[in-house]
Amino acid sequence: MADTLTCLQFLSAEHFTSGADIAASLGVSRASVSTALASAEDYGVTLTRRTGAGYRLSTPIEWLSRDRVLAALPAGSHIDIDVVARTDSTNRRLLAAPVHGKALVAEWQDGGRGRLGRRWLAQLGGSLMFSLGWRFEGGTAGLSGLSLAVGAIVAGALADAGVAAVRLKWPNDLLLDGAKVGGILIEISGDAMGPTDAVIGIGLNLIAPAAVTDQACAGLAGHGLVPGRNALLAQLLTALESGLAEFTEHGFAPFKQRWESFSAWQGQQVELVAPDGSRRAGVLAGLADDGSLRLTTDAGELVVHTGDLSLRRTEPAR
């Protein structure tokens, strides 16, 4: 039986490809290819079909290429990369065998996860979904603020790539025009005293997913984004390699002001909603030295340490 994703990777938007040619390449029947491509819309892909000619993508897809990404990394980089067509979760797969400096990027994730167990939705060819393994010789106590540092690194790299309007929402969302354009999920394994392996998962929408979610979503394309998928991935990995080396040496301190400069709602009225539904309102004052959130409330300053909360902007009372 032919796999839909595998068959789609034979197609382009420039010319038609016959089902017979795909079938011959995969060693399956032509009917199997036809059945597989009938599910293209499940991946957010629209095909043009022509009798006697075959199939063509209605919208171009820049397929990910390990060679192209590695070639775009700077000389002296120690990042390695594996590209897979599909996996359940790049984070889960790397956690099984973490390797320092190894990036895993997937065209498609069947079980991509966001914060608080939310599913990460994407469109084939319209996103970047990757994880990076990084070893810290110290224990987990030294990783305070890591997700915020990664957010500042990614936002800075996206600004360099032409999208200057990306903002950060504590603790690990990236926003564009108030809608979610990306997220960060970091998972840790190892000894409390070290060494510690971190798997840094990053999902970015280049095209806003068509699937309905519980929050507004945006895409980077159309907002000044210059590089294609492979070049953008290389830029992000380059920035992460440099930034994580800085974090290893200096901790969160160098990233505090950078994060605040990208903060979506700095100085604005916000509300924190706990899992039990309780709410706390205040003005977003910035970050503490360890990356905790500082809120100015009627009762004084409130420092919030946990990220298991939903942060929302609210309109000030009139």
Image (tube, rainbow, N blue to C red):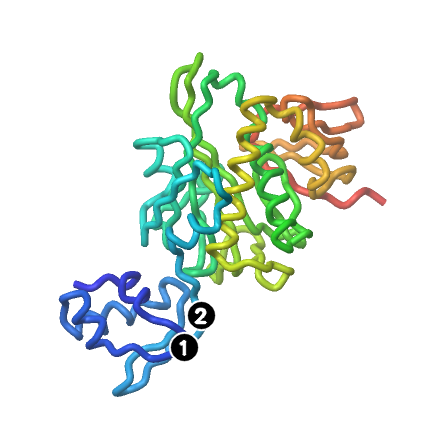
Circle 1 or circle 2, nearest the eye? 1
Quadrant of the snapshot with the C terminus: top right
Residue at x 24%, y 61% (from the top left corner): 3
Q: Residues within 10 Å of mark 2 (few under 14, many from 20)?
A: some
Amino acid found under the numbered disc labelled 2:
Pro
* Residue at the spot 58% in from the left edge and 27% down from the top edge: 145
Task: From the viewer's side, name the closer residue of 75 and 219.
Answer: 75
Residue type (three-letter) at the residue carrying disc 1: Glu
User: For residue 118, which quarter of the picture?
Assistant: top left
Q: How crowded is mark 1: few (under 14 residues within 10 Å), some or many (20 or more)?
A: few
**Residue 55 quadrant:** bottom left
Q: For residue 53, which quarter of the picture?
A: bottom left
**Element type at mark 1:** loop
- Which quadrant does the N terminus fall into? bottom left
- Mark 1 and mark 2: span between their CA atoms? 8 Å
Q: What is the residue that sits farthest to the top in this orientation? A: 193
Work out whether residue 276 can be spotted: no
Foreground pick, 132 / 273: 132
Q: Is the residue 193 above or below the residue 216 in the image?
A: above
* Residue 301 on image: x %, y %: 76, 23
Q: Please give the name of the residue rendered at 35% of the width and 49% of the height, measured from the top-left corner.
A: 83
Circles 1, 2 touching at the beta carbon (< 8 Å)? yes
- The answer to whether any part of residue 300 appears in the image is yes
Q: Where is residue 245 in the image (x, y as percent from the top left)?
A: 54, 29
Q: Name the residue under label 2.
A: 60
Of pointers 1 and 2, the one earlier in the residue sequence: 1
Q: Mark 1 sits on what residue?
A: 14
- Along the horizontal axis of the image, is 259 left or right of 199? right
